[in-house]
Image: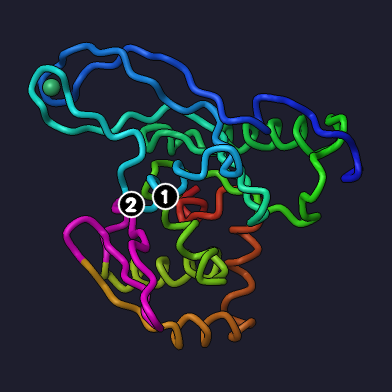
Amino acid sequence: MLAGRIRASRETMSTFTDITAGCPNCGTQQELTVARGINVARTPAARDAIMEGRFQRYCCSGCRVEFTVLRPFTYVDWSRAQMFGVFPLADIDEWPRCEQVLEGTFSRTLGDESDGAPDGIPDEIRLRTVFGLDALREKLLLFDAGMDDAVVEVMKLRWVMEGGAAERRRPLVIDVVADMLVVRSEDETAVWSRADYEALRRDEETVTPFLDVLAAGSFRDLVRFAS
Ligand SMILES: [Zn+2]
């Protein structure tokens, strides 16, 4: 299957679309260009912009306030074996449907319904559904650091249950530096050590039941435990 010919599809190119969006500050309507599909090999600057928090940030033509616009898009980085479905944070309660959207895209691109994948694509693709560009950035940071994002979600769950962050807040890893994870939940910031992560990862008796729930789909997020 993986030795097939290159399929020029929406998922293997970077594609963009023009939309009309209102400024969240003053309401001025403006024409903006947003991603529908990012292939990092074709558009490496997009990954840099996501990591630096300036992807699809626009300056309002009316009030000059900056805002971010996000429409659902697919993000693929075959060199890192990654495929993401990125959805607006406002859609997070619809995560089962969004997972299906991504799985359908994956199936058409690389899976059973495809004509065959582009050459050089690894067998094991990390398939993830995320909500918001901060959540995408978090996964990219963790994967760059060679970490298991599901174990990090269990660390977050533990933090939430200990009262460190209110349940409806969404703790997000905002930086991985040396042996530290920097985690933010609204106005709270915590620093976790990589040693804690490694200890939890190795504690199979504790972590496995949680990992089983998280691994049931591509939305590897503690929100799964709320349903
Ligand atoms: Zn404005």
Instruction: Tell whether position 132 is magenta.
Output: no
Badge 2 crowding class, 10 Å Cα cut-off, few under 14, some 14 to 19, many 20 or more, is few
**Residue drawn at the location 44% of the way across and 72% of the way down:** 155
Q: Is residue 17 left or right of residue 102?
A: left
Disc 1/disc 2 C-alpha distance (Å): 6 Å
Q: Is mark 1 within 8 Å of ligand 1?
A: no
Residue 137: x, y in percent? 42, 53
**101 and 115: which one is in front?**
115
| Amino acid type for the residue under numbered disc 2 | Glu
**113 and 35: which one is in front?**
35
Give the answer, above or below, for where 71 lies relative to 170.
above
Residue 197: x, y in percent? 48, 80
Image quadrant containing the N terminus: top right
Residue 63: x, y in percent? 8, 23
**Residue drawn at the location 36% of the way across and 76% of the way down:** 177
Residue 52 bears which disc, if any?
2
Residue 48 bears which disc, if any?
1
